[in-house]
Image (cartoon, grey):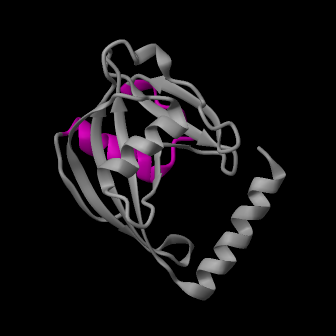
Amino acid sequence: MALHHRLIGRVARIYWRLTKPRTIGVRAVLLDSDDRVALVRHTYTDQWYLPGGGVKKGESMETALLRELEEEVAVKNPQIERVLGVYHSRREAKDDHIIIFAVRTGDGEADALEEADLTEIEEAKWFPFDSLPASTSPATARRIAEYRNGLTGLGNW
């Protein structure tokens, strides 16, 4: 993991403690035709997460989700199936709201998963539901379990 990304993350957390910003993020339970889920490992953390990121000012949730999927894992034509849940997080001193979507890859894209933004994404892989890596973040594991159980989530991240 890149040392400079860890340092940038620390500076960001200090800034967030001082400013307490309200942020909106989007993430995807992105599935391929074999019902494997896409997970990413960022350059600034050791855990695996659902792909996604922040919504920019003036950007819709859908536009942000599609942009993040293309930027992080090079998926260009995903099909959004539904909203899985809306969550709130106070981690890192932010007032963060995260919208989770169920998304499928477009035709022929299952093999196209790759680390599209090498400065942010260390690794991107497909995983069967029953073989998630041990270092999957707890919140990511909860979102995947909710998807598998047909639940709509709401509440704390």
- In reply to whether residue 147 is colored magenta, the answer given is yes
- Foreground residue, 22 or 62? 62
- Foreground residue, 118 or 45? 118
Quadrant showing the N terminus: top right
* Image side of residue 141 versus residue 16, left or right: left
Residue at 40% x, 17% y: name it. Answer: 109
Q: In the image, residue 96 lies at what x, y percent?
A: 42, 70
Q: Quadrant of residue 114?
A: top right
Residue at 65% x, 73% y: name it. Answer: 13
Tally the marks: 0
Principal secondary structure, stretch drawn in magenta: helix
The magenta stretch is 129-149
Q: In the image, residue 92 lies at what x, y percent?
A: 56, 72
Residue at 42% x, 53% y: name it. Answer: 139
Q: Quadrant of residue 11?
A: bottom right
* Image side of residue 47 versus residue 37, left or right: right
Q: In the image, residue 2 lies at what x, y percent?
A: 80, 47
**As displayed, is residue 31 above or below residue 84?**
above
Quadrant showing the C terminus: bottom left
- Foreground residue, 45 or 66? 66
Q: In the image, residue 145 lies at what x, y percent?
A: 30, 41
Asked whether residue 50 appears in the rendered view, the answer is no
Q: Which residue is farthest right?
A: 3
Asked whether residue 66 appears in the rendered view, the answer is yes
Q: Which residue is farthest front?
A: 58
**As displayed, is residue 127 above or below residue 137?**
above
**As displayed, is residue 83 above or below residue 59?**
above
